[in-house]
Amino acid sequence: MPGLAQKARLSYPEGMDSIFFDTPPAPPERFNMAAHVLARAGDRPDRTALAIVSPMGAARWRYGALAQAVEGIAAGLLASGLGPGDRLLMRLGNEVEFPLTYLAAIWAGILPIPASAALSVPEITRIAAETRPAAIVAAPDVSLPDGYDGWVIPALALREMETTPPVAPAMGDPDRPAYIIYTSGTSGQPRGVVHAHRAVWARQMMWQGWYGLTPDDRLLHAGAFNWAYTLGTGLMDPWAIGATALIPAEGVTSDQIPLLLKRYDATIFAAAPGVYRQILERCEMPDLPRLRHGLSAGEKMSARIRAAWQAATGTEVHEALGMTECSTYLSGSPDRPAPFGSIGFPQAGRRIAVLAPDGEAVPRGTPGTLGIHASDPGLMLGYLDAPEETAERYLGEWFLTGDTVRMDEDGALAYLGRADDMMNAGGYRVSPLEVEAVLNTHPGIAESACAEVEVKADTTVIAAFYTGPEPLPAAELAGFAAERLAHYKCPRIFVHLAALPRSGNGKIDRKSLRRQPLT
């Protein structure tokens, strides 16, 4: 990994403040994100870069063909009239053309705007109005902005472009914009995030800090092509190191994933916690001798799911904390597993701190807001056309993530939840994750989620929502919690649900929980 430290330089200031200050990697002065991702294609053209897998078989792309398709589409986009700096809104489904077009646009200096095919017409209409794309590349069955009468490039045209004579990548300042991606909107209205070309260079910090990734790995990601988690962890990173990416074909269900892990010799598995849960609930795990470990991100994985996966497969799950604005920065890894109850450690090259409201680092063991230093090469350039909103996220030299964490004496960090999800009980701030971890150990509860709810004017309490075979007596659950939690942390209301509400990307929708009927 050129430019990336081979060993972590753990730099903790005296006084045991909650701060980690390492030297981040510096990208070359002239850089192109897509060229970096495909840099290994030249020395391994016949190696499988991508296999789209199903129980019926696999469609494979070799590195040479992958690079040729990206370079051809880049040339085709330029020949069609798009130019460097133009914006291209992507309305493509779960198909290989999604990452090919994404990389091709960046290769040509065009700014792609990847957007989920699941977005509704009103949602994509708002995004188009904000981003003002020069063109939209669209599959026939994916929603388009309402009233849009601009330039639409049909998805079928992309396949014709794949054989266009290639063009050289548009090299330049690594700090210039490369793409625009939208946040999930779980903490409010989705926002456009502008990232620089250097963002992919910063992802090298995750290769050993989270994945334990090598060129010989075969990484199966359970997500769709057009999910940001899949795009980065499942495709960009394996390709940049020269590994093989495995992506389930359209229509593959969670109970078929174990078969694919075995049949296609996956060495690393990546998914959201909900996928792990579905696999464990729906099928028996086969013997997986090639699988080394799993990766999880998107939301906190419960201790129960983690233990069940380890018992079923004999492999660990390494978790990471991140966000659209900076990808991941805290994680466990094969070389340094997260201690029990923590999310892991800052990755080598990161600069992070746990901050008090005045911007000073809090002492170890004290909860605070997680901050990322402004020098992090993976940090966004800013929110689209919103300099004031961008500035509001900074406190001095620190970008505030909105996550509440605690750094322990060994440098590991415990994730306590989003700042806006923290609950107030009698003046004490309570993490919903802490309460949920206890409730999830009850034998009658499959899954739980907690939220602060209003029961009458100016009066709020902690409510626990749970799934399981049948409703349980509230008194039983209250007693169970009281034996394991401080009084002020105990839920006052228990509500049985058929399923917990989730956002489009599978995260628990806590805002929806607060609106649930309490009887």
Image (cartoon, rainbow, N blue to C red):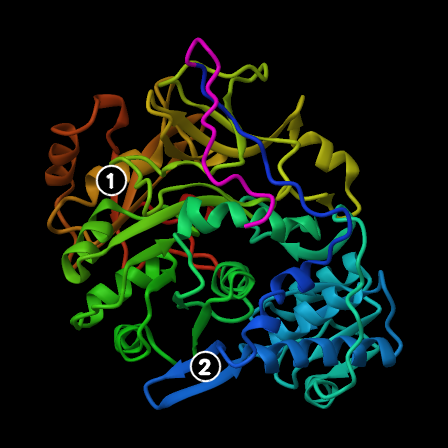
Which stretch did the figure color magenta?
Answer: 1-16
User: Which residue is painted at 44% across and 67% down in the image?
Assistant: 223
498 lies left or right of 367: left
Overall secondary structure of the magenta section: loop
Secondary structure under badge 2? loop
Q: Is 293 placed above or below 90 here? A: above
Q: Is 29 placed above or below 152 here? A: above
What whole-number distance in Å separates the C-alpha atoms at marks 1 and 2?
A: 34 Å
148 lies left or right of 179: right
- Pinpoint residue 258: horizontal percent, then vertical percent: 26, 73
User: Which residue is painted at 47% across and 59% down in the image?
Assistant: 505
Q: Is residue 9 magenta?
A: yes
User: Disc 1, disc 2: CB below 8 Å?
Assistant: no
Q: Is 52 placed above or below 276 here? A: below
- Pinpoint residue 289: horizontal percent, then vertical percent: 20, 68
Quick one: 3 or 177, which is closer to the camera? 3
**How busy is the neighbourhood of tag 2: few (under 14 within 10 Å), some, or many (20 plus)?**
some
Q: Residue 213, located in which quarter of the rendered image?
A: bottom left
The numbered disc on residue 250 is: 2
Residue 510 visible somewhere in the drawing: no
Task: Give the number of the mark in front: 1 or 2.
Answer: 2
Say how many tags the image has.
Answer: 2
User: Which residue is painted at 20% across and 38% down in the image?
Assistant: 438
Quick one: 193 or 315, which is closer to the camera? 315
Q: Residue 417, located in which quarter of the rendered image?
A: top left
User: Which residue is painted at 68% across and 46% down in the image?
Assistant: 27
- Pinpoint residue 135: horizontal percent, then vertical percent: 81, 73
Secondary structure under badge 1? helix
Name the residue tied to disc 1: 437
Type of residue at label 1? Ala
